[in-house]
Amino acid sequence: MKQEVLLNINGSPYEIMVAPNDTLADVVRRKLGMTGTKLGCEQGDCGTCTVLIDDKSQLSCLTLAIACEGKDIRTIEGLESNGSLDPVQQAILEKNGVQCGFCTPGVIMSAKGLLNDNPTPTREEIKVGLSGNLCRCTGYEKIIEAVEAVVDGEYSAQAKTQIGAE
Amino acid sequence: MDDMVRDFSIVGQSIPRVEGFDKVTGRAEFTDDIDLHGMVYAKVYCSPVAHGKIKKVDISKAEKYPGVLAVITGDECPKKYSVNDLLPTETALAVDKVRYFGEGISAVAAISEQIASEAVELIEVEIEELPAVVTAQESAEQTDNLIHQEYPNNTNHTAEQIFGDVDDALVRADVVVEETFYTSMVNGGFLEPQSAVADYDPGKKKMTVYNCNQLAHMLQHTVAKTIDMPLDDIRVIIPNVGGGFGGKTEATPSVLITCLLSRKLGRPVKLTYGRDESIFQNKGRHGCHLTLKLGFNNDGTIEALDLNVLLDGGAHSGWGFVVLWFIAALTHLPYTVQNIRYNGRRVYTNKPSPGAQRSFGGVQARTAVESCFDMAAEKLGINPYELRMINAVETGYKAPSVVEVRHAEFKKCLQSVAERSDFVNKHGKLPRGKGIGLAAGHYSSGGAFLLYNSTRAHSTANIRVDTEAGATVFCGVTDIGQGSTTVMTQVAAEVLGIPVRKVNFICQDTLLAPMDNGTMDSRATYGAGHAVKRAAIDAKQKLLEVAGAHLGIRVEQLECKDERIYSIYDDNRFIGFWDSVTMYQDVIGTCFGTGDYTPPQPRGDYPGKIIGPSPAFGFTAQIAEVDVDLQTGLLKVEKYYEATDCGQAINPASVEGQVEGGVVMGLGQALIEEIVVDRKGRVLNPNFHDYKIPTTMDMPEFDSEIVDAYDPTSAYGGKEVGEAPTGPVCAAVMNAVYDAIGVRITDVPITPEKVFRAMNGQHSRDLELETTTIGFANAKYKGD
């Protein structure tokens, strides 16, 4: 039976009817139209559906929406505000860590989760942190360089508005 | 190259992707993200057997299921389709027979995906199972168990090319090496599963198709022919494409199914494949058996190349016949061999049908040729680097097939990787278990092959320059993530001397963009680049005339840069670019320009001549350093050197991205990737859990270089880079493994088990038919 849940997504409350087997990915994509979260396999293998739940990166295709009540859910749509990018977004963009862009939202959310846990990861720790995110385009090199640049402070809060200003 | 020629403002700059902001914020729309008013959802009943006669399809229960709007079977549209209408074998849904595991038999449209899935479960299908033909060798010997009745001996296509006298040359040669190779059938592994939305307008009787496809115009053609609608009543729109790598160059059944259902219902229908269906539809790389003989003289010069190929074609034709010819074409270069014989045969098997995956034909050709080069080097007592340098093609080389290399910096590539890796000093001298291997290759920048066999231009671009929208380019090329939109934008901005943000690039829509061969065969930067540059020059010329009249300066003495049109002799005499646009609009009208590009037509008279010749070739040289665990056979690629000749890099960061991505895709095939089927043809790994592609943890340390190059035949000196880097990777790793353990592995993927067995004296190919013993967790099929 469907039931009403209150989901806190990107800081806003959404009251929605969900079935017990509705995944969080289905809810954000199909019910709420937040299609930045992708579905590449729906089996937890590819990482394109990664979101933050209480600051930790989670696979939304394996997470039941009903279990998310009362938690702080953040999707890719919740990172940027009015043209001002999150440092990870900006680094991925400027370091050419994006090609087709299908894995990109998941990669960014995983990187956010990693940096929440460990703000100064080594290159090896970045690799481990992103090992659940498949990317077929980039060979990962530029993605890792981008996260390293964030760790090195190249994309601090002051640098945030560069893209918007251009 | 004259420095003046390369004095660019925007070409050569690593600007971020013009659509990058949308991609990092989740705004970029992919096909499955589309939500149209009144849209319904389709699901497919997939065949549980790989080969069989369809005895019954009972859709009555599914049709009555609440929420179901339509159910169709193969009878709805039995018309066969293919690439370019050549060797058509495929249908939207199976008709009378199934030929591969997972082939669609029936499709349901319902008001929700869930209801559609539930209704699919109610479809009753009876299939009389036939023995599955699962290997190319067994298929090649069949006379009775035919996959397509109209193709005797299961042969889809054969190819033969002979140049010079190979038998004589092999007798004359001082050293002859011969080896047999197998390259695995792999899947493109694009992260976005195929998805299609069809929206039939019952009032206008027109169809709009949204699909993640690389070739908008060929898809339009295939849809029109297959579902029997006029070409100009079909509009194809390509949203963002989540990776293609060649696998999205053909029409998938999903497109045709949604079109059929949408036309039936008069409302939009969406069908998105699951990862399993995406692998069943495949169109990845052909599995290939190769037997290669190379003959050399004692001085290292190559005399002869004799190649026999058996290509595992899976259930259908598709790009397969082109791949068969491409393997031949890709052995004519990058070495100066004069005596060449090629015998190829492509057979059908009951497997997911492969197609034209990145460096198609290249991986197979390079794996064999580059391995045999190392074998010959050892026999000749010449370093593998030297042997390649002795035989490397240079600018102006004409192959015996009359294929001409109009520009090549291949030797620079070889020198670059050899120097950076200290190859000559390391090769053969590292401790046991450590190895270094070299391999090289090339790829064409678009061929002579035109969609639907006409003489029209391969690329056309139109441009509109006005104060209302800036410079708006209309071009049919598709950005599948490789960056063509950014590169074309840079080309137009360079010509007009305006910032990138003033250029709109409208593509991927057959209503707006003129006919284009699309994104395949590494042709976008070269072919579409020419068309865009010519269109921009056409418009620029018109603006210069107005500006010249206003300034009192002859047109040929004017130049555009930094949004100004100025005298090349006195840049204080200028008019603002947009002022001249205003003037043009006020006095003459909207400023339009057009340009097109068609490559030189192939010369000579030999079979397959249309496949292979190219206006330009990209080159690559690569070196892998590996570590082999002598106890377990575990193989790790630790460092990877690459050098690319892609001519002038229009966007160097994008070039690096293509190289890194292309090499890692090659490493996937070299080390881990293979579509595995059991004796009944059932795919055992149709998911990313068991079909593994490389992750961050599989990356080697990269060291790549774009060598200084400029192809004067190209719009801004650039040529291909998307495919060449994938070709030689398997061979580089094989050669490194040989250097590490003294055993030559001849088939990929090079699993630890193969290395272990090879070290213990067992031929690695013994494993080929034993793969079913591997326990795949997700592959327990009914009836076992």
Image (tube, grey):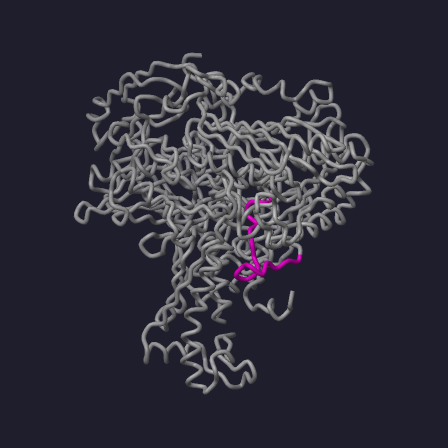
> Toward the viewer: B278 or B97?
B97
- Location of the C terminus of chain B by quadrant is top left
- Location of the N terminus of chain B by quadrant is bottom right
Q: Residue at point 74% right, 23% down?
A: B631
Depicted A165 relative to depicted A28: above or below: below
Quadrant position of residue B60:
top left
Depicted B725 relative to depicted B544: above or below: above
Q: Is residue B176 left or right of residue B251?
A: right
Depicted B383 relative to depicted A151: above or below: above
Q: Is residue A64 left or right of residue B38?
A: right
Q: Is residue A149 left or right of residue B34?
A: right
Quadrant position of residue A2:
top left
Where is residue A96? Give x, y as percent.
55, 54
Outermost residue, top direction?
B784
Where is residue B696? Give x, y as percent.
60, 40
> Toward the viewer: B237 or B303?
B303
The image shows a total of numbered marks equal to 0
Outermost residue, left direction?
B203
Report if residue B720 lies within the magenta region: yes
Magenta stretch, main secondary structure class: loop
Quadrant position of residue B735:
top right
- Residue B189 appears in the rendering: no
Magenta segment range? B708-725
Where is residue B273? Give x, y as percent.
38, 34
- Residue B546 appears in the rendering: yes
Where is residue A107? Give x, y as percent.
52, 45
Q: Residue at point 63% right, 54% down?
A: B396
Report if residue B288 lies within the magenta region: no
